[in-house]
Image (cartoon, rainbow, N blue to C red):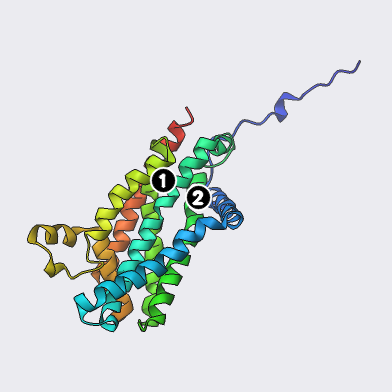
Amino acid sequence: MTTTLIATDTIREPRRSVTLTETVRQSFSFGYRGLIKIARNPEQLFDVVLQPIIFTLMFTYIFGGAISGDIASYLPVIIPGILVQTVITTSIVTGTQLREDMNKGVFDRFRSLPIARISPLAGALLADVVRYLIATVITFAVGFAMGWRPEPLGVLGSVVLVLICSFAVSWIFALMGCLVKKASAVQGVSMLIMFPLTFMSNAFVPVDTMPGWLQSFVNVNPISHLITAIRELCNDGHVGTHVVWSLVGAAVLTAVFAPLAVRAYIRNAK
C-alpha cells in the first residue's frame, strides 16, 4: 500500500473572469464551430441562396413597370430594398437555430466550460454573418445581371454596412431564442415583427404614394433609413447622414440587446 499525498499549494482557484482578448478568441472559435455546422448542413443556405433570386426577379418584373415605368429605372430602387429585406429577414434564423441547440442540450455543455458567457452567443452570430454575406453577394449579382450598374466603392460600403446592421439586429432574435421555449414560436414571433417593418418601409414603393399616417411611420422606420443609406452609397457613391444613423442604430441595438441576451442565456442555466 502506498499513500499519495497531494500538495495543497498546487490546487488552483477556479477562474472567475475572462479577459477581453480571450473573449474575442473564444467567440471566433465558436464562430468556426458554426461554419463547420453550416458546411455539414448545406440546406441551411437554401434561403440565402434562393430568396434573393426569387424576390428580386418577382418584385422587379411585377412592380417595375407600374412604379418606375420600366425595369431599368426600378432597379436602383428595388435592389437595395431587396437586399435589406433579405438579409434582415435571414437574421431570424439565428434565434431559431439558437433555440434548437438549446433544446438539444448543446449549450448546457458550453455553460460548464471556463469561457466568457457571451462567446457561445457571439460565435453563433458571427457564423451567421457568412450567410448574410452570401445573400448580399447574390442580390448584387442578380441586380448586375439585370442591368443595374452601381458605384463600385458604394457596393463595398453597402456590404460592410448591411453586415454590421444585420449582426446588430440578430442580437434581438438571439434574445428571443433564449426567452421563447420553442424554435417554431421564435420564428413565428420574429416574422410577425419583421414583416411589417420591412414591407412598411420605402423598400418597394415611393413614400409619397402612401397615406399620411403611414408615411409618418415609414419615415421613422429604421429599415427605411438603412435602405436609403444603401441607395445613396450604391447609386450616388455618397455617404450621407442615413449611413451615420444606421451605424449609430446598430451600435445601440448591440449595446442594449447583447447584454440582455447573455443575461437570458445565463438565466436558462439556473
Mark 2, Cα crowd under 10 Å, few <14 / some 14-19 / many 20+, is many
Residue under label 2: 124
Residue 64, given in percent of the width and then of the height, sits at: 25, 76
In what element is the residue under mark 1?
helix
Closer-to-camera residue (216/262): 216
Q: Is residue 146 visible?
A: yes
Residue under label 1: 174
Specify the amino acid type for callout 2.
Ala
Q: Is residue 170 above or below residue 67?
A: above
Residue 91, given in percent of the width and then of the height, sits at: 40, 54
Question: Of marks 2 and 1, which one's residue comes earlier in the chain?
Answer: 2
Residue 73, given in percent of the width and then of the height, sits at: 26, 82
Q: Is residue 38 above or below residue 264?
A: below
Q: Residue at x 81, y 21 (%)?
A: 5
Residue 258, given in percent of the width and then of the height, sits at: 39, 46
Going by the image, does 131 lie left or right of 250? right
In what element is the residue under mark 2?
helix
Indicate the quadrant where residue 210 lies. Answer: bottom left
Q: Residue furthest right?
A: 1
| Circles 2, 1 touching at the beta carbon (< 8 Å) | yes
Closer-to-camera residue (163/36): 36
Going by the image, does 268 lie left or right of 248? right
Q: Is residue 19 above or below residue 112?
A: below
Q: Residue furthest left?
A: 212
